[in-house]
Image (tube, rainbow, N blue to C red):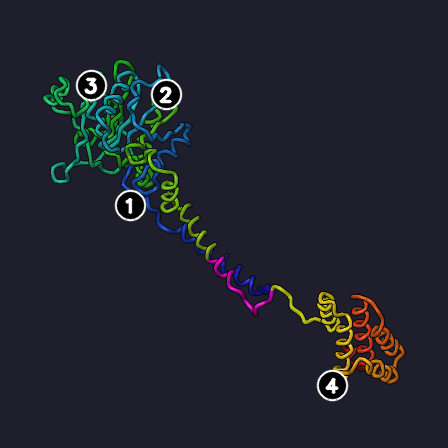
C-alpha cells in the first residue's frame, strides 16, 4: 500500500471514530424512559443527583443490592446504628419477612427513610394515598417550619390507617402484611395547605426513627434541578448525625443476580460509555476490512529469475555426473557452443579437435583463444566431474569473448 493510500485509510478511520464518539455523547440515554427512583439512573425520574449531592456533603453512600432478611439481627449497635440511615425510594414492596425485619430494626434503634409507595409505611400505621385533582382542591406543599421554598404540588399524601385495620394487624389476623408498630412521637416535616401530611418523622422509645415521604418525586433529578426540593429534603438525610446512607437498589431491580457476560453486554448496550466502545469496535472492523483490500498491482512474494547459461551447464553437468556420462557431457557442451555460433549438425569425436583449432585461430582476443585451448584439453583427458565443470567454464569464457563489446558493456 502506497503512503498516500495509507493516509486516506487512516483519515477515514479517524473521521469514523470521531463521528462514533460524537454520536455516543449526543445520543439520548436509555434512562430517560426509566421511571425507577434509583441512584444508578441519570434520567429525569432517577435519583443519581441525590446520591452525588450527599457524597459531596461528606456522606458515604452505599447502594445495597441484596435482601433485608438479616437487617433486624445486624451487628450495628448503639451509636453506629444512629450514624447509618437506610433509604427505600419508590421500591417494589419487599416480602413480609423483610418488612418485619426492617420494622424490628427501627424499633431496636435503627433509622430509615421511605419515599413513595414502598409497603414499609404500613409497618408504622400509614399509607401513601394518591390525590385526585377533582376531590382535593389544594395540593401545594408547605415545609414545617414554614420557609419560602419553590416546591411543586404533591401528588400523594400520608394517611393514617383506620383503627380497625390497626387492630386486626395487631392481633396477627392479617398474615400477608407487616404488623404495624405505632411511634411514641410524630413530627410533621411537610404538609399541604389543606392540612394533608406529605412528610413525617416517627420516633420510637429506643431511639429508632422512620421518616416517611408520601411523594417520591421530590427526590428525582428533575425536581433537584428545577425546584427547591433539594433544599428541603437534604436536611432530612443529614439530621441525626448521619454518616452513611444505604440505598435499597435490590427492590428496584438492581440485584446481584445474572451472569457476568450478560451484565457486561447490558452495560455495553445501555450505558453511554459502553455504547461508545461498541461503536469504536465497529470502526476497527471497518478499518480492518479496508486495509485487507490490496491497492495497486499485485506483487510477487517470491522473486523469480531466469538462470544464466553457466547455471544451466552446471545443472547439466550435475545430472550427467549422476549418470556417469562424463564424455557425453563434454561432447554436449562442445555441441552447445556450435549451436550458439549457428553451426548445425553433430561432429564425430575426431572432428571436434579440428573444429576447435579453427575456432581458436578465428578468435580476436588472447583470452578467447586461451579458453578454446582449455576446452580442447578437456576433450580427451581423463577426469571426473571436475572435467565437465572445466569444459563448461571454458565454453562460457569463450562465448563471452566472442560476444560484441557493446552487449557486454550494456549488460
Helix, strand or loop at mark 3: loop
Residue at mark 2: 83
- Tally the marks: 4
Residue on which the image places disc 4: 344
Task: Give the mark, 3 or 2, whose residue is nearer the N terminus.
Answer: 2
Residue numbers of the magenta segment: 286-300
Residue linked to disc 3:
181
Tell me if I can see residue 153 in this picture: yes
Quadrant of residue 261 in the image? top left
- How far is the residue under mark 1 from the one under mark 3? 37 Å
Q: Tell whether 171 sits left or right of 206.
A: left
Which badge, 4 or 3, is on the more N-terminal residue? 3
Q: Which residue is mark 1?
A: 33
SS under mark 2? helix
Q: Judge whether residue 411 can be spotted in this image.
A: no
Q: Nearer the viewer, mark 4 or mark 3?
A: 4
**Structural crowding at the residue carrying mark 1, measured as other residues with C-alpha within 10 Å and reported as few (<14), some (14–19) or many (≥20):** few
Q: Residue at x 15, y 18 (%)?
A: 170
Q: CA distance from mark 1 to mark 2?
A: 35 Å
Give the residue displayed 82% in from the left and 67% down from the top. Answer: 383
Quarter holding the C terminus? Answer: bottom right
Would you identify the image quadrant in which residue 95 lies? top left
| Residue 195 position within the rendered picture, expressed as x and y whole percent measured from the top left | 17, 29
Amino acid at each position: 500500500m502506497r503512503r498516500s493510500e495509507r493516509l486516506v485509510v487512516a483519515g477515514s478511520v479517524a473521521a469514523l471514530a470521531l463521528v462514533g464518539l460524537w454520536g455516543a455523547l449526543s445520543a439520548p440515554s436509555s434512562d430517560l424512559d426509566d421511571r425507577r427512583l434509583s441512584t444508578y439512573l441519570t434520567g429525569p425520574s432517577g435519583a443519581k443527583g441525590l446520591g452525588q449531592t450527599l457524597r459531596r456533603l461528606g456522606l458515604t453512600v452505599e447502594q445495597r443490592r441484596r435482601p433485608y432478611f438479616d437487617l433486624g439481627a445486624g451487628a450495628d449497635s448503639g451509636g453506629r446504628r444512629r450514624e447509618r440511615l437506610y433509604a427505600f425510594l419508590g421500591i417494589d414492596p419487599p416480602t413480609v419477612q423483610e418488612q418485619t425485619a426492617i420494622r424490628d430494626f427501627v424499633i431496636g434503634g435503627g433509622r430509615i427513610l421511605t419515599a413513595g409507595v414502598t409497603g414499609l409505611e404500613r409497618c408504622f400505621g400509614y399509607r401513601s394515598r394518591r390525590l385526585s385533582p377533582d376531590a382535593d382542591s389544594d395540593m401545594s406543599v408547605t415545609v414545617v417550619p414554614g420557609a419560602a421554598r419553590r416546591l411543586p404540588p404533591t401528588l400523594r399524601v400520608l394517611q393514617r390507617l383506620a383503627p380497625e385495620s390497626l387492630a386486626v394487624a395487631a392481633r396477627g389476623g392479617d398474615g400477608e402484611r407487616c404488623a404495624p408498630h405505632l411511634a411514641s412521637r410524630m413530627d410533621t416535616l411537610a404538609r399541604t395547605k389543606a392540612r394533608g401530611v406529605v412528610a413525617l418523622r416517627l420516633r420510637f422509645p429506643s431511639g429508632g426513627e422512620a421518616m416517611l415521604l408520601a411523594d417520591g418525586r421530590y427526590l428525582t433529578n428533575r425536581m433537584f434541578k428545577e425546584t427547591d426540593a433539594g433544599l428541603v429534603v437534604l436536611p432530612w438525610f443529614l439530621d441525626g448525625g448521619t454518616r452513611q446512607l444505604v440505598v435499597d437498589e435490590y427492590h428496584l431491580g438492581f440485584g446481584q443476580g445474572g451472569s457476568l457476560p450478560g451484565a457486561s453486554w447490558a452495560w455495553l448496550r445501555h450505558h453511554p460509555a459502553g455504547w461508545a466502545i461498541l461503536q469504536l469496535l465497529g470502526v476497527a472492523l471497518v478499518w480492518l476490512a479496508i486495509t485487507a483490500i490490496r491497492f495497486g498491482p499485485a506483487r510477487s512474494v517470491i522473486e523469480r529469475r531466469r538462470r544464466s547459461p553457466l547455471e544451466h551447464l552446471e545443472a547439466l553437468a550435475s545430472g550427467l555426473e549422476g549418470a556417469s556420462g562424463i564424455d557425453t557431457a563434454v561432447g554436449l557442451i562442445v555441441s552447445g557452443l556450435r549451436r550458439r555460433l549457428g553451426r548445425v549438425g553433430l561432429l564425430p569425436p575426431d572432428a571436434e579437435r579440428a573444429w576447435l583449432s579453427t575456432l581458436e585461430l578465428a578468435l580476436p582476443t588472447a583470452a578467447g583463444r586461451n579458453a578454446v585451448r582449455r576446452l580442447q584439453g578437456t576433450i580427451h583427458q581423463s577426469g571426473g566431474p571436475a572435467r565437465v565443470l572445466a569444459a563448461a567454464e571454458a565454453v562460457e569464457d569463450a562465448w563471452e569473448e566472442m560476444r560484441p563489446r557493446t552487449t557486454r558493456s550494456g549488460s
